[in-house]
Amino acid sequence: MPFLNHGDPFPALSLPAVGGGRLSLPEDLAGNFAVVLFYRGWWCPYCNAQLAAFARAAERLAELGIKVAALSVDAESEAAGLVTRLRLPFPVAYGADPTAIAAATGAYTGEERYLQSTGFVLDPEGRVELAVYSSGAIGRLVPDDVAGYVQYLKAHV
């Protein structure tokens, strides 16, 4: 599938979530602006830095009405360890099939074993406002950019 563009509906994805239950996207984020982060895995230092930054910004993002969710191919124990270590306050899904997710979203894969860093900003109806695709380890959304972008949208759209 080609990349998702502005205005495209985010595809329905359902994955097991750390702590139990499932993360169903975009429906679990509906009614709010949202960020969906695909991270390479618990082992990726750049992903760890990005997820930690979103954890630190969680209160500010929530005040702006922005929800965050993340997912990867990690096993449950790896994802749970990451959530604990980084104190991630947002839902994190695990066990993603990189080929299926790439087909649905256009995300790059790393040797078809994991998803490359990919980030989406969704509108309250679950449509893509912004998509950031990386073909490698770097190049990703940061919380300050997301906050500023959503503030702009709320003021001008």
Image (spheres, rainbow, N blue to C red):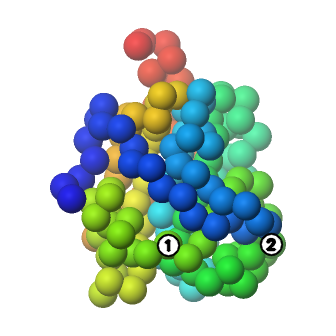
* Residue identified by numbered label 2: 84
Q: Secondary structure at mark 1?
A: loop
Indicate left or right for 114 with 69 as reference: left
Q: How crowded is the residue under tag 2: few (<14 C-alpha within 10 Å), some, or many (20+)?
A: few
Judged from this view, the residue extending furthest toward the top is 156
Label 1 amino acid?
Answer: Ala
Looking at the image, is 53 positioned above or below residue 42?
above
Looking at the image, is 110 positioned above or below residue 26?
below
| Residue 6 sits in quarter | top left
Label 2 amino acid?
Answer: Thr
Residue, x 72% and y 84% (percent of image)? 77
Residue, x 48% and y 56% (percent of image)? 13
* Residue identified by numbered label 1: 96
Task: Pick whichever, 13 or 84, lies toward us.
Answer: 13
Q: Position of residue 152 (x, y in %)?
A: 46, 22
* Mark 2 and mark 1: Cα distance apart in space: 19 Å
Residue, x 26% and y 41% (percent of image)? 5
**Residue 141 visible to the viewer:** no
